Amino acid sequence: MAKSDSCIFCKIINKDIPSAKVYEDDNVYAFLDLSQVTKGHTLVIPKNHEENVYELSEKNCEAVFKAVPKIARAIKATYEPEGLNLLNNNGEAAGQSVFHYHVHLIPRYGKGDGFG
Ligand code: 5GP
Ligand code: ZN
């Protein structure tokens, strides 16, 4: 269910807020993170609003992780990183700041790339 009135990522899905699209299918949307901890830092989200891993349905989990390898390959082809981290924060104490489930894809370029 969309929560476009209160959720920034639902607003992005609805195109009420602009974003740099990386990938889209019926159930999933991926876009560049505003803060770009490294070049090509991408967020993958289900189109249906679910807060975090505790709420995540099998359907959305499957849709997101079916898309992740395709998006990872696209990032690899575009940015030519040396590696790639997948990261998912659940709950404020774990660093979650947007409460719409998302996976970070963070390309890595070696020591001093700004992450980790
Ligand atoms: P979290 O801290 O919840 O794991 O990650 C939320 C991410 O969403 C942050 O990395 C933040 O930069 C990103 N973010 C927050 N608001 C926006 C926005 O309006 N547009 C985009 N593209 N990214 C956003
Ligand atoms: Zn949402």
Image (cartoon, rainbow, N blue to C red):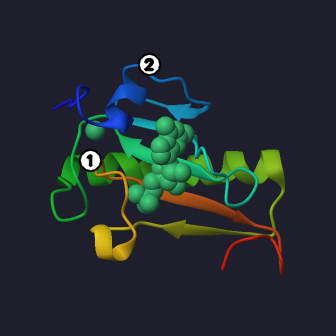
- Does residue 83 appear in the picture of this structure? yes
Q: Is residue 13 left or right of residue 77?
A: left
Q: Nearer the viewer, residue 109 or 7?
A: 7
Q: Is residue 105 left or right of residue 99?
A: right
Q: Is residue 113 left or right of residue 36?
A: right
Q: Is 90 placed above or below 4 here?
A: below
Residue 106 image position (x, y, % from top left): 63, 62
Numbered label attached to residue 60: 1
Q: Nearer the viewer, residue 64 or 41?
A: 41
Residue 66 image position (x, y, % from top left): 42, 50
Point out the image quarter for the C terminus. bottom right
The residue shown at (80%, 45%) is: 78
Counting labels gives: 2
Instruction: Say which of marks 2 and 1 sits in front.
Output: 2
Q: What's the residue type where badge 2 is placed? A: Lys
Classify the position of ligand 2 by quadrant: top left, top right, bottom left or bottom right: top left
Callout 1: helix, strand or loop? helix
Callout 2: helix, strand or loop? loop
Labels 2 & 1 near each other (Cβ < 8 A):
no
Q: Where is mark 2, residue-wise? A: 15
Residue 73 image position (x, y, % from top left): 67, 51
Point out the image quarter for the N terminus. top left
Q: What's the residue type where badge 1 is placed? A: Asn
The residue shown at (41%, 66%) is: 88
Numbered label attached to residue 113: none
In which image quadrant can residue 115 be found? bottom right
Residue 21 image position (x, y, % from top left): 59, 30
